[in-house]
Amino acid sequence: MSVPVVTRFAPSPTGYLHIGGARTALFNWAFSRHNDGKMLLRIEDTDRERSTQAAIAAILDGMTWLGLTWDGDAVSQHSRAARHREVAGQLLASGHAYHCYCSPQELDAMRARAEAEKRPIRYDGTWRDRPPSDAPAGVKPVIRFKSPQEGETIINDNAQGRVVFANKDLDDLIILRSDGNPTYNLSVVVDDRDMGVTHIVRGVDHLTNAARQTQIYAAMDWPVPDMTHVPLIHGPDGAKLSKRHGALGVEAYRAMGYLPAALRNYLARLGWSHGDDEIFTTEQLVKWFELSSIGKSPARFDFAKLQNLNGHYIRNMGDDDLFQELMSFLPHAEGGPALLAKLDDAKREQLKMAMAGLKERAKTLVELKNGAAFLFAARPLTMDDKAKQVMADGGKAALAELIPVLTACADWNAPSLEAAVKAYAEAQALKLGKLAQPLRASLTGSSTSPPIFDVLAVLGREESMARISDMAV
RNA sequence: GCGCCCUUCGUCUAUCGGUUAGGACGACAGCCUUUCACGUUGUAAAGACGGGUUCGACUCCCGUAGGGCGCGCCA
């Protein structure tokens, strides 16, 4: 019987949940679910200056939207400071840590000097072996971890492989600030230990921290959790993710009309693979997810591919489900609330009816929303440029001819309307497009729309004839 | 500067010493078609470079180049 898997996602609440964090959360989530384990959520808010409630809310909201659920309550790291201090004290007592009286200014000077002399930038160990009697009066010391100076610290990482750090390259890090508050590396180790975390999955930017943390685990004689450091996500240009590229909060992706399921699928495919599988359900992801299948090279974020995937999800979703997605999307969409206000029962029905035709040509919920705009347009419709062109090129005349044809149509549904118009086109030796495009322009104000006979059917006889008449004169 | 890591089509990736180096997105071309899409068929497109090891390297080793991450009393 193996130990139950416990993973954790540990964001720092200094901003929204960005796309890299979302993927890290997804990997933690998928791995824990794959193993019937748990994923805990810990808010790393030990930096009181920069942590905000708004950021915490944004992160929880983003995860919820993405469908990434965590087990138990979110843990505030700050609330555990007393415990962190306790461990710092133990380290001090066991000789694995010491007081350091260097001021921040001295440290800055030390770094500047090292940089100028092109030496490695590290704490020089001034207070490592100095007796307490040397302590200057009135200076509150920090506690530094006494990092081993010889030998190696080895990380056996599921994604990165065996990574070796020479201990001489790892300096004595501060574990307790002069104000008595713990710093990141100490807190993480203590919390992961206390929370029973068995597997740590986080970004490679933590790889050096992994080495330092490994040393702290060793000093405390605690077992080191299984580690996986996943490569970062870069912008399309290979450089750091910038705002205009993809370093947006997940709520921005919601506003852009992406479906959570599509985003999950896309994110999973960035840095992780299961053979040639591209499109898979979340259930399949959970079933297939192995840490060893995570790659080690960074990936670039590709909106075109996300769009394509999203379109696939939209097209394959049932009309009712998609309608619901659209409804929950609208409050977050530009112009969405206004559209929502116009949505009475009749419009809801029309919208549902139009869903099949609409979803076929929408890659995002934004496009779906825009595609449905004709349903809500007020007469007389405003024509876009291409629609105007169609009307100018004999469109008006075509509409005038069609009015009696449509009026004569007994059954107002797509098949019979199509049959009637086609018969007329044939009789007049006209290409169907010559009639369809003017119809489309008059009914939607645009040159593109769902199949025109569906549009007629959705709009209904009265509204359709009114819109056509508006433009036929 | 020091340390660690990365490098297969434009992009995401498959390959775990022997393949005509596969798939997907994107691009281009054709088909389908009432528009736009969808769908479909096809085309172009890759092992950074240089050395080894080996009967045989994309795959293992070394070096070079390029890129990323880290080096806070941030996380």
Image: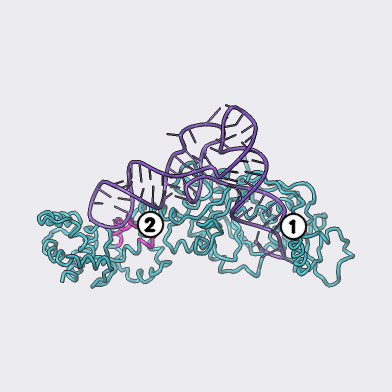
Chain colours: A cyan, B purple
- Amino acid type assigned to the residue bearing label 1 in the image: Pro
Q: Which residue is mark 2?
A: A363
Under circle 2, the secondary element is: loop
Magenta-highlighted residues: A351-367
Residue A371 is drawn in which quadrant?
A: bottom left
Instruction: Check the residue under mark 2 and report the chain it is in.
Output: A
Please tell me which residue is depicted at 70% across the width and 56% down the height of the picture.
A190
Q: Are marks 2 and 1 on the same chain?
A: yes
Q: Quadrant of the C terminus of chain A?
A: bottom left
Residue on which the image places disc 1: A120
Query: Which of the two residues, A100 or A440, is positioned nearer the viewer here?
Result: A440
Label 2: how many residues lie within 10 Å, few (<14), some (14-19) or many (20+)? many
Q: Main secondary structure of the magenta part?
A: helix
Distance (Cα) linking label 2 and label 1? 50 Å
Quarter where residue B22 is shown = top left
Mark found first going from the N terminus, 2 or 1:
1
Q: Chain of mark 1?
A: A
Q: Position of residue A86 (x, y in %)?
A: 76, 60
Which amino acid, mark 2?
Lys
Which element is circle 1 on?
loop
Q: Are marks 2 and 1 in contact (CB under 8 Å)?
A: no
Which residue is pictured at 19% across the width and 71% down the height? A470
Looking at the rendered image, the quarter that the N terminus of chain A falls into is top right
- How far across and how far down the image is residue A34, in percent? 54, 45
